[in-house]
Image (cartoon, grey):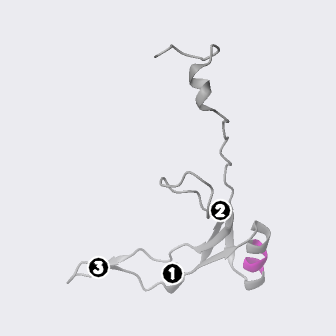
Amino acid sequence: MVARIYKPSRNAMQSGTAKTKAWVLDYEPERPREVEPLMGYTSSNDMKSQLRLGFDSKEEAIAYAEREGIAYQVQETKEPTRRRIAYADNFSYRRVGSWTH
């Protein structure tokens, strides 16, 4: 079973960077999920799919996977480029684009 080591990205409801600093180790599913015919629930017999381990750094996650003999893949994340803008930039003479006010 292959594990995936990655930094979770922020969700659409976040404007900050909370809960995106830690690295996570997740297991890839061995089998696809099955639909239970009577009630329509989706289930799986794979217990490792419920396991999620958090680490402070990528090196700690890799060391854990190697120590436990777990095959792993590291997915690097692209850091977003932050633009510093201010409200006053809306009224600047050097503004790019057409004036809308």
**Residue name at image x 21 percent, y 82 percent:** 39
Give the quadrant of residue 3.
Answer: bottom right
Select label 2 or label 3 by which is in front.
2
In the displayed structure, would residue 80 be above or below residue 52? above
Residue receiving disc 3: 41
Res. 7 mark: 2
**Residue name at image x 73 percent, y 85 percent:** 68
Query: Is the stretch drawn in magenta largely helix, strand or loop?
Result: helix
* Image coords of residue 45 (percent x, y): 43, 86
* Image coords of residue 50 (percent x, y): 51, 81
* Of 82 and 47, the residue lying toward us: 82
Residue 74 among those drawn in magenta? no
In the image, 44: left or right of 37?
right
In the displayed structure, would residue 26 be above or below residue 78? below
How many numbered discs, if any?
A: 3
- Write the start and end of the magenta stretch as one range: 62-66
Give the quadrant of residue 42.
Answer: bottom left
* Image coords of residue 64 (percent x, y): 75, 79
In the image, 86: left or right of 68?
left
